[in-house]
Amino acid sequence: MSFCRIIIAILSLQFVGGVAGELQAEELKLTLRTRPIAIRIDDAAATLDREETWNAEETAIIVCDVWDLHHSLNAVRRVEQFAPRLDAVLKEARKWGVTIVHSPSDCMDSYSDHPARRRAVKAPVSPRLPHDIRSWCSVIPAEERAAYPIDQSDGGDDDDPAEHAEWVAKLEKLGRNPGTPWKSQSDLIAIDSERDYISDRGDEVWNVLDCRGIRNVILTGVHVNMCVLGRPFGLRQMARNGKNVVLMRDMTDTMYNPKSWPYVSHFEGTARIIAHIERFVCPTITSDQIIGGKPFRFRGDDTSSETKDRTGRIASETVLKDFQTRWVTIDVPSTWKTASKGVLNGYRGPGWSRCVVKIPGEWSERDQLELSLDQPVEGERVKAWINGHALQPASNKSLAIPSKQVNPDDHNLIVIRVENDSNQLLKPPVLKVLQTDSE
């Protein structure tokens, strides 16, 4: 299975309401923000607002993966900042009749006897369960036109190395797996035993929404560039299956490391992801539309609204500033000069390629996968990731793809970084399925 076209970008060039007191009983008056799909990079600043009134009893809030602990200490700190306000949002929303679904993934064992968990399990099975509603969703058709705005292939951990080492030691002392230390939802967010639901399964959440006649869904929680977008109950699944879904953009966070492209602050990275969502996935709202006051802002977030609205603009003022630095689809093999219409003539440096591929489930179950390249993969010249997980060499010109990192029968994001010193672009990689010895 080969890729006929790949996406190329240059790493060094890209940076790339009513209030609660005004609401009628059982009505949510919301201001939904979207962005047009930009034709030019400089068009990316525009935002569009529209007013909508939602029936509260036809609305649900899903709290995604606001865990008690996380492998990133900074992620824990940011959750501790916004979780009390999110709890206040949920309390106010309950008064109006909004359904609350708590979805701390991989933590269901902690809630096996909880009334809210039993309530979700007992929800009648929907006769309209969408296809693949149990699966992670890595991309929806609208995003195929998109330039994904940040590189999260390193997992997005932005901890200070020394602090992170201390955090790992503390997690181990607590008897937690430092890689996946979560066991429950944060205690900063209350669960109403009489009314709420607990589930991390896409089909169960859908059953709850269907049996309660939920048309409108508000997603909150972490992390917006990973779980909030991709979980079976996340933004993409809700959007592609017809729910009137929005992101509460000030009640979320990203896993983004400023040491990765586009080398902006953590909060600017979050702003860029939110702009991507508003353009290609769904609208967004803010918490003040539920509880009044002002939108939540993290301590240390110095990104102005002007900066956030400039998402997608060319930020480099020094090197090839006239080159449109969004991801572009080009034919390969080629040269930097040809691909850039002469702008990158003689370019030497790193290039990034990416594509989304749907991998048959039987491949990941029975066979070994390899990504075959046209360059040696030893050293630091070639790096690659699948769904954010780094790949290791399998041979001189191939990388092994562990089956556990594959989303079977679903979309998988493959990212490749190559150091180029010959002005030649990478040839199309080939995804190979190797038969096991037992077959």
Image (spheres, helix red, strand yellow):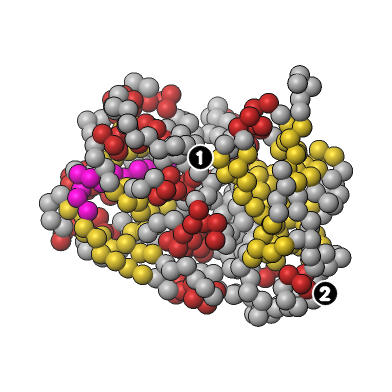
Which residue shows up at 70% across the image and 78% down it?
Answer: 320
Which residue shows up at 46% across the image and 59% down it?
Answer: 280
Q: Which residues are magenta?
A: 54-70
Which residue shows up at 68% across the image and 47% down it?
Answer: 385
Q: Position of 342 compared to 145: left or right?
A: right
| Image location of residue 88, percent across then percent down | 27, 48
Residue placed most toward the observer, 244 or 129 = 129
Task: State the CA–CA distance, disc 1 to disc 2.
Answer: 41 Å
> What SS does tag 1 mark?
loop
- Amino acid type of disc 2? Gly
> What SS does tag 2 mark?
loop
The reply to whether residue 310 is in sight is: no
Residue placed most toward the observer, 422 or 302 = 422
Picture quarter with the C terminus: top right
Q: Which residue is mark 2?
A: 346
| Image location of residue 129, percent across then percent down | 37, 34
Q: To which quarter of the image does residue 299 belong?
A: bottom left
Q: To which quarter of the image does residue 427 belong?
A: bottom right
- Amino acid type of disc 1? Trp
| Image location of residue 336, percent across then percent down | 77, 69
Q: Position of 254 compared to 204: left or right?
A: right
> Is 103 one of the magenta-colored residues?
no
Which residue shows up at 13% across the image and 56% down it?
Answer: 24
Which residue is most to the top?
A: 438
Q: Position of 308 compared to 361: left or right?
A: left
Q: Which residue is mark 1?
A: 136
Residue placed most toward the observer, 77 or 22 = 22
Looking at marks 1 and 2 on the same chain, the residue that comes earlier in the sequence is marked by 1
Contact check, label 1 and label 2, Cβ < 8 Å: no
The reply to whether residue 150 is in sight is: yes
Picture quarter with the N terminus: top right
